[in-house]
Image (spheres, rainbow, N blue to C red):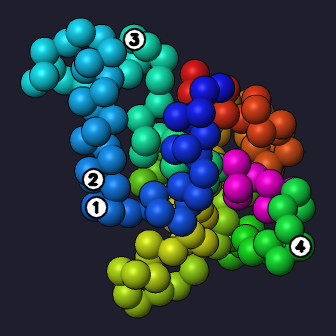
Amino acid sequence: MDNSIHIFNYGCQLWGQNENTIEKTITLQKKAIRLLSFAHYQEESSPLFKNLNLLKLTDIVRQNNIIFTHNSINNNTPRIFNDYFNFEESNHQYQTVNSLNSTYSIPAGSLELPTYRTNSGKSSIKYICASTWNSTLKDLSIKYTERYHKDPLWISKTNVQNLLREHKG
């Protein structure tokens, strides 16, 4: 990994949670990818990132959120984060809640979302990481239904590198 990747990773969970605060950095990253690709300055950047197999800054932040959450759940972070996330406990058996394809589903293995009244609370690391984990769990559980049905906590038990590879693929 080159140093520019490390710079994006360093502390991104503190400064990168709100897309509005990193808007200038995102714009610079898009300009850089166009320059590297010898593309027109107005060309859509998403295909360029894909062709060069590079992550956008927002994807780097999301990936780091998944790693942090996975490590916290598995007690691979400083002790202060050992109980930072709690698994959601579903009290009911309604089909709309348990169906992975339902908009309202809360799959087993989902994390509790902290209740906040303000937008600043909803932009906290704890809230965003839990939300990111839950959407990743749902996406991967739909993709790998057989694994989910064998063990709903399968992604928390999966090696973090394999988890990221499966999420990307």
Q: Is residue 69 magenta?
A: yes
Disc 4 element: helix
Disc 2 element: helix
Disc 1 element: loop
The amino acid sitting under disc 1 is Asn
Q: Upstream in the sequence, badge 3 or badge 4?
A: 3
Which residue is label 2 attached to? 23
Which x, y percent locates residue 6? 61, 40
Which residue is label 1 attached to? 20
The amino acid sitting under disc 2 is Glu
Q: Quote the CA–CA distance across marks 2 and 4.
A: 33 Å
Q: Quote the CA–CA distance across marks 3 and 2.
A: 23 Å
Q: Upstream in the sequence, badge 3 or badge 1?
A: 1
The answer to which image quadrant residue 109 occupies is bottom right
Which residue is label 3 attached to? 51
Which residue is label 4 attached to? 79
Which quadrant holds the N terminus?
top right
Which x, y percent locates residue 165? 67, 26
Q: Is residue 87 magenta?
A: no
Q: Are marks 2 and 1 in contact (CB under 8 Å)?
A: yes
Which quadrant holds the C terminus?
top right
